[in-house]
């Protein structure tokens, strides 16, 4: 195994198509720029999810011009089922297919197999599953996942990992973690375009600090362009959540981007960024938008409520986004379909605001204001886990 | 432009329970003229359409009677709105019943004449329903020439062209949008006509030509593309080759097929952008070629239309 690793390490020594430059720091938190094949990404960054090759309700042009979004995420599992990898290849990759000339990150497809498809069996070779659309059977191996993602042509690809929910305990967690490392090696071997696509590894190990440490150690040896922290945001205790993020960000290399997968709540984004993570993704913004909820500085607003029928203010007073500049709560309540651009923007807005405050040396004040405002209307006040996490970041609330 | 009702395919719903004072909106709200007008003033549209009852059900004698009743009621409603003081910049449009039966009978004509007499400078004519060129032409001959003529719900490009030659200025229709909702793209290619020498054309000659054109159009149907068909799956073609719209500049048929397949709402948005753009382009073309409508029509039909029988065959296949 050791000699095999060395071989992989040496193979992986060529310069990846990614540059990471930290502009400024505030304790653990950092404001940086990731340079990718399709332009710069300003971090910390929230990546909106365009599951099936389209953002729900937003055109690519809107994404670029109204929201100024640097990078979006697309799901390999969905694109693999429809339209299929061959069409993807024929059309010249996802960028061209969906008219998006900024960056794209694709996941490995493993997560949706667990969440949507019917998992048939899982062994060392790969995952076999039934499609959630027509029940057809497929086998996803690390090699297949790489092949599909190579055809999609995303700027950042994720290695196939063995996902367990964070509430799982016992030897299964360890098995999954070790298997994820072995699969990562197979992914590195199978990756055909290391000159124009980046491969990120995913740190697993549940909420067990020791396992996470081992995993970090093993994966950082592979010298990848960046690392993701996976297997979180699945119903684990919030204290475990932030501690796990902290353990990982401690051990992951400082000169590489860190991506926490599946994080979308505004408070989680803030805490993780302050702990030193750079990239986040979640369907939360678009999904809640479809149910008529909007983010604001003072927590979530449920736009469907009758009390907004005569409210002629914007969703959020301070927000500079297209929706807030042009439409009132009353209008949105009546039309019900709250414009999603706003919701994306406020997510982006939160992390972007933090970024700017780090650059201006006012991060401490920004974070403090954010949490105080966010929980202003909450009768329980700021949750304890946030206070603890912020203590770690040297911010007193 | 503010109209008193949302256009509905199920027309009985709109006119089913109207009494003398109220009319119904969306089969739910009963509104009287005053209330409607107040609402209109609040919203400050550029045009207000006077409340109207549209009759399309039953036939023969019963229909004629019903039409007359409706026309009279519309007329009374119109009178009420004309009398309102606070008209601001808004223009009124009495809706005249231009049903086939309505146009044919004498009493209806008289009611329509009263509309015209009652009219003020600002008001416009707004006409409902006749499809054939000859009927519309005949109708407009009885109307003052200097007023704008608008038409409600005239849908397909073929209808629009028919409307143009019968003298309609303003068109309103949700056709491009409903088509987009159903995943159907309208295909209108730019029409380039070779200019012929201008000959002296009297009004009679025009009439004759237009009648011929109208007859020609009646056999034609607009060319469209059902994007959800399997054949588009791998197509890298644009919707329309020279189209300058956002959709055609950035996407191909394969992508739209994919979006429809996975039921993404962007599919309808993108097709709607294309369809509406096509309409704008068509109207632009019509204005550019106003001196030679005949040439334009002939070329348009050649490039952008299919025979009605053919298109029905296709739609039957789809069904």
Image: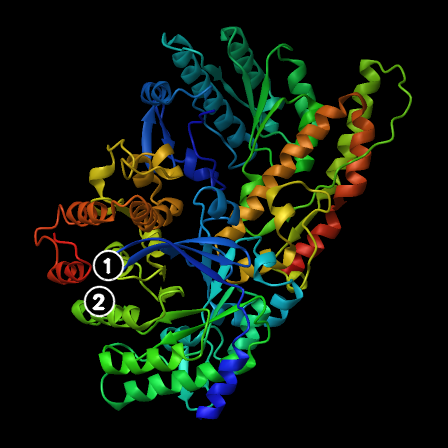
Along the polypeptide, which appears first: circle 1 or circle 2? 2
Q: Nearer the viewer, residue B87 or A98?
A: A98
Q: Is residue A140 visible?
A: no
Residue under label 2: A242
Disc 1 packing (10 Å; few <14; some 14–19; many ≥20):
many
Residue B218, by quadrant, is: top right
Residue A2 is left or right of residue B160, and the answer is left
Above-or-below relation of A317 to B93 = below
Residue under label 1: A271
Disc 2 packing (10 Å; few <14; some 14–19; many ≥20):
many
Disc 1 element:
helix
Label 2 chain ID: A
Q: Residue at image x 32%, y 56%?
A: A30
Q: CB atoms at circles 1 and 2 under 8 Å apart?
A: yes
Q: Nearer the viewer, residue A136 or B312?
A: A136
Q: Nearer the viewer, residue B146 or A342?
A: A342
Residue A143, percent across and down?
53, 82
Disc 2 element:
helix
Label 1 chain ID: A
Residue B3, percent across and down?
45, 27
Residue A307, percent across and down?
20, 39
Q: Residue at image x 50%, y 6%?
A: B120
């Amino acid at each position: 195994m050791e000699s095999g690793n060395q071989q992989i390490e040496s193979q992986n020594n060529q310069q990846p198509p990614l540059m990471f430059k930290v502009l400024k720091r505030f304790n653990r938190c950092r404001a940086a720029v990731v340079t990718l094949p399709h332009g710069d990404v300003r971090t910390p960054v929230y990546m909106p999810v365009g599951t099936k090759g389209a953002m729900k309700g937003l055109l690519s042009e809107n994404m670029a011009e109204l929201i100024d979004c640097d990078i979006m995420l697309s799901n390999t599992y969905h694109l693999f089922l429809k339209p299929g990898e061959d069409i993807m290849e024929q059309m010249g990759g996802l960028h061209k297919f969906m008219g998006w000339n900024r960056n794209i990150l694709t996941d490995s497809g493993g997560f949706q197999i667990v969440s949507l498809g019917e998992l048939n069996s899982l062994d060392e070779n790969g995952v076999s599953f039934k499609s959630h659309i027509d029940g057809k059977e497929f086998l996803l191996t690390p090699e297949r996942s790489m092949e599909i993602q190579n055809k999609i042509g995303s700027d950042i690809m994720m290695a196939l990992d063995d996902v367990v929910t964070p509430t799982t305990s016992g030897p299964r967690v360890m098995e999954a973690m070790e298997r994820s490392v072995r699969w990562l090696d197979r992914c590195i071997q199978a990756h055909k375009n290391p000159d124009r696509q980046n491969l990120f590894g995913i740190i697993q190990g549940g909420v067990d600090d020791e396992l996470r440490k081992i995993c970090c150690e093993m994966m950082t040896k592979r010298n990848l362009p960046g690392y993701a922290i996976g297997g979180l945001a699945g119903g684990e205790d919030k204290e475990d959540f932030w501690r796990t993020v902290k353990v990982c960000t401690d051990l992951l290399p400082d000169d590489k981007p860190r991506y926490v997968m599946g994080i979308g709540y505004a408070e989680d984004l803030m805490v993780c960024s302050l702990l030193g993570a750079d990239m986040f993704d979640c369907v939360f913004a678009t999904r809640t938008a479809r149910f008529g909820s909007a983010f604001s500085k003072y927590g979530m607003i449920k736009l469907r409520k009758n009390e907004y029928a005569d409210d002629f203010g914007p969703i959020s007073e301070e927000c500079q986004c297209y929706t807030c500049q042009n439409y009132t709560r009353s209008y949105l309540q009546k039309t019900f379909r709250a414009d999603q651009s706003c919701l994306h923007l406020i997510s982006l807005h939160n992390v972007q605001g933090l970024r700017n405050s780090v650059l201006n040396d006012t991060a401490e004040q920004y974070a403090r204001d954010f949490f105080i405002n966010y929980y202003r209307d909450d009768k329980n006040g700021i949750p304890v886990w946030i206070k603890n996490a912020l203590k770690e970041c040297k911010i007193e609330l | 432009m503010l109209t008193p009702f949302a256009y509905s395919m199920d027309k009985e719903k709109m006119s089913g329970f109207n009494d003398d004072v109220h009319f119904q909106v969306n089969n739910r709200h009963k509104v009287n003229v005053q209330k409607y007008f107040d609402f209109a003033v609040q919203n400050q549209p550029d045009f207000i359409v006077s409340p109207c009852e549209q009759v399309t059900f039953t036939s023969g004698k019963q229909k004629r009677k019903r039409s007359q009743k409706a026309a009279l009621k519309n007329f009374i409603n119109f009178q009420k709105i004309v009398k309102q003081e606070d008209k601001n910049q808004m223009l009124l449009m009495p809706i005249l019943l231009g049903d086939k039966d309505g146009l044919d009978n004498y009493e209806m004509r008289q009611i329509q004449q009263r509309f015209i007499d009652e009219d003020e400078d600002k008001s416009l004519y707004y006409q409902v329903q006749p499809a054939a060129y000859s009927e519309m032409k005949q109708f407009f001959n009885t109307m003052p020439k200097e007023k704008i003529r608008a038409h409600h719900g005239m849908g397909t490009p073929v209808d629009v062209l028919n409307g143009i030659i019968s003298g309609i200025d303003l068109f309103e229709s949700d056709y491009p949008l409903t088509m987009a909702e159903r995943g159907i793209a309208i295909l209108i290619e730019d029409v380039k006509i070779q200019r012929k020498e201008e000959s002296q054309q009297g009004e009679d000659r025009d009439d004759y030509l237009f009648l011929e054109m109208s007859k020609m159009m009646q056999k034609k149907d607009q060319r469209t593309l059902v994007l959800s068909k399997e054949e588009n799956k791998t197509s890298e073609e644009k919707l329309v080759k020279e189209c300058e719209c956002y959709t055609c500049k950035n996407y191909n048929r394969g992508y739209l097929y994919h979006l429809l397949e996975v039921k993404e709402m962007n599919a309808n948005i993108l097709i709607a952008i294309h369809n509406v753009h096509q309409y704008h382009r068509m109207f632009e073309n019509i204005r550019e070629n106003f001196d030679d409508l005949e040439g334009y029509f002939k070329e348009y039909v050649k490039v952008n239309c299919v025979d009605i029988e053919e298109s029905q065959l296709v739609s039957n296949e789809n069904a």
